[in-house]
Amino acid sequence: MAEFDLKKIQDILTKMNFDGWLFYDFRGSNDLAHQILNIKPDAHLTRRLFYFIPKQGEPVKILNGIEAFHLDHLPGEKRTYSSHSSLQKQLSSVLRKGEKIAMEYSPMNAIPYVSRVDAGTLEYLNTFGIEIKSSGDLISMFGALWTNEQYKENKIAAKALYDIVDISFAFIKLKITNKEHVTEYDVQQLILDEFKKRNLITDSDPIVAVNENSANPHYAPNSDTYKEIKENDFVLIDLWAKVNSPEATMADITWTGYVGNEVPEKYSKIFDVVAQARDSAFSLIKTKLSRGLSLKGFEVDDAARNVIVDAGYGDYFIHRTGHSITTETHGSGAHMDNFETKDERLVLPSTSFSLEPGIYFTGDFGVRTEIDVFITPDKEVICTGGERQKEIVAILK
């Protein structure tokens, strides 16, 4: 676990104009609070606990008297309660009417990734006269910002993924040219072997999907379920990994190929729409950030989705445009989403995320093109690892 940094949190509160951050947990209900407060995974939590961090001054711990030790590793004054009336008294001494307080809450549950505080607790806390706001952007600033070292390590992983895609397509070409049997699973295992050679780690096996399997965004072959790859097949490869070090960040890309010398218009036509959607989103990010304008995740999704909708394929784009990337593949920052959710979190400097629009025809094929974007501290917009895919790879060419 990263060391708890009170100054960092209070600097964020001041910057975001919050009066304080109130962490709440009951029986492990708030995993986000556990991560930020470094609460041990095996902590035996059976009563409500609160940890209040004001934007200035000393934090306050409010714990049940029989579990008063759980936050001893954190700075601040400890106050205990036993009865519900004593809990109310302790909260009253901390929460001031009219103050804007952050909690793991999302209005209308619009962003379920940060929604950890139950409605009843919110109703109870509202009786103290505070204004409860979502901590979504605070969590992004605390947990989704990359350090310079993380960016350097990520470049290594991202470059490796591009190289491994080339190796994978070359492997397919060799097998097909030599009239040898090759499957989705064979290519997947080749990718995993390349990860090992380069000391990269992943949280799950990569996707290698042929024809109708590519129309299932989360399909992945295994030792029991896979398809053979043959000439004139459409192939989608989605792979993600990071350098094998404690705080390394993930890289995640998707490329498509066709097992032939020339890609049929059936596939290239759809790829062009998807690539245009990706590039439209990328262009929006660059334009708004270069002008010093704020940008939210749902706006990026709109930029990509509108291209696909205008082309007549809106019903076939069945997931968000992108996800936050941190030390985890799906991180704690803003997602590029106005489909599954309306993500109103800010797209922040020093954060990374994927852009991966797709069009999927069930039972036939699906096209997705995915890049990773990193926003530098100076708001430069970078496609990590390599260039954006411009056309489907003709694997036998």
Image (cartoon, rainbow, N blue to C red):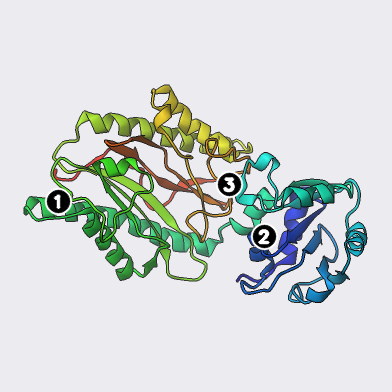
- Identity, as a three-letter code, of the amino acid under mark 3: Ala
The C terminus, quarter of image = top left
Point out residue 44 in the picture as x, y percentages from the top left corner: 68, 73
- Which residue is found at the position 28% from the left and 60% from the top? 191
Observer-side mark, 3 or 2, equals 2
Is residue 53 at all visible to an observer of this figure? yes
Image coordinates for residue 174, horizontal then vertical, percent:
12, 54
Residue hosting label 2: 29
Give the CA separation, mark 3 to mark 1.
39 Å
Picture residue at 91% right of the left edge, 52% below the top: 96
Picture residue at 75% right of the left edge, 59% below the top: 23
Q: Which residue is mark 3?
A: 334
Q: Earlier in the sequence, mark 2 or mark 1?
A: 2
SS at mark 3 in the image: loop
In this view, the residue in front, 347 or 61, is: 61
Q: CA distance from mark 2 to mark 1?
A: 50 Å
Relative to residue 209, is residue 56 drawn left or right? right
